[in-house]
Amino acid sequence: MVNITHKSNTLRKAVAQAVVKVGSQQTIQIIQENKVPKGNIFEMAKVAGLFAAKKTSDMIPDCHPLPIEYTSITYVIKGLEIYIHVEIHTIYKTGVEVEAMHAASVVALTMYDMLKPIDKNIVIQHIKLLEKKGGKSDKKDTFDLPLSASILVCSDSISKGDKKDRAGKIIMEKLQNIGVKVEDYEIIPDEKNDIQAKVKEYIAKGINMILITGGTGLSKRDVTPEAIQPMLEREIPGVSEAIRSYGQNRTPLAMLSRSIAGLIGNTLVITMPGSTKGAEESMDAVFPSILHIFKIIEGAQH
């Protein structure tokens, strides 16, 4: 059985707040007039916060490294209190609330360090999460489906034994991790007729998904899209767009991929790059969210 939840690598956002309370209005005036002896506290603290956001995994033992796509650090003065707001975005498989709170805390500590020579009554009042979008706790929908898949590796060099397949193995591992049963795994040369014959064979067996890796580039032997395109009954452009967009955020070379996706009957067919990284990122881009298509198909049949 396949448990489908929204844990794909989509936009994650978190907003954290810290409050620094100074001891007097005179300190606020010194800050506003940019007369703090150690420098401009807003600019210095912002730089410290940016470093902290990126270094969170180095400081928090259970926090995984992740790519920070966007960081905003802003300030609001209310009376004797300085409100620090840190907003962080990422395109990844986990949330960024710890990164936001870590950055807010370091911003507050930097302010404390810069102001303590002129004010002995500074207090960091609280650090809290204001907003969170995405992460492992987000589950918009959950349901179970028994699903099967076939993996087809298209490569002249791998089929000859000159190279070992890694892309197909990565696809298999990721499918098994979400509970999809891999019925077939085969390696064939980059031959249009061979690709089409295998796809027809899998469809005749009633396989839910056919995932093809390799042959989506621009060399003369890359014929996977040409083999699959005429077989598709309903193309799903959003899937290939998501794969390229996800890859483009990591390497500009992703724009050269000619991956396509669509339905043949009720069987989903997705073509992916032949590189290990390309196949891995393609899987991360669309799984497990793409499995909702089978919920739609199931509903249409009842």
Image: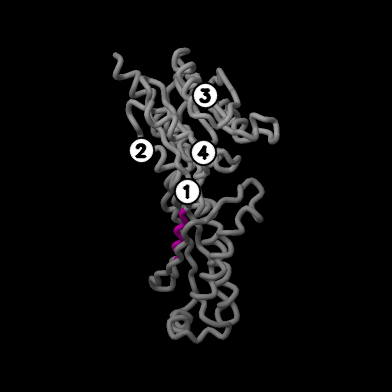
Residue that carries the numbered disc 2 in the rendered image: 237
Amino acid residing under circle 4: Asp
Magenta stretch bounds: 84-89
Query: Percent x, y for residue 299?
Result: 31, 19
First reached walking from the N terminus: tag 3 or tag 4 = 3
Gap in angstroms between the C-alphas marked 2 and 3 = 24 Å
Q: Nearer the viewer, residue 63 or 1?
A: 1
Q: Secondary structure at mark 4?
A: loop
Residue that carries the numbered disc 3 in the rendered image: 194
Query: Percent x, y for residue 161?
Result: 70, 31
Q: Nearer the viewer, residue 181 or 53?
A: 181
Res. 256 mark: 1
Query: Percent x, y for residue 79?
Result: 39, 73
Gap in angstroms between the C-alphas marked 3 and 1 = 24 Å
Of marks 2 and 3, the one in the foreground:
3
Query: Percent x, y for residue 43?
Result: 50, 75
Does the magenta segment cover residue 167?
no
First reached walking from the N terminus: tag 2 or tag 1 = 2
> Residue shown at 48%/54% (left/top)?
128
Residue that carries the numbered disc 4 in the rendered image: 222
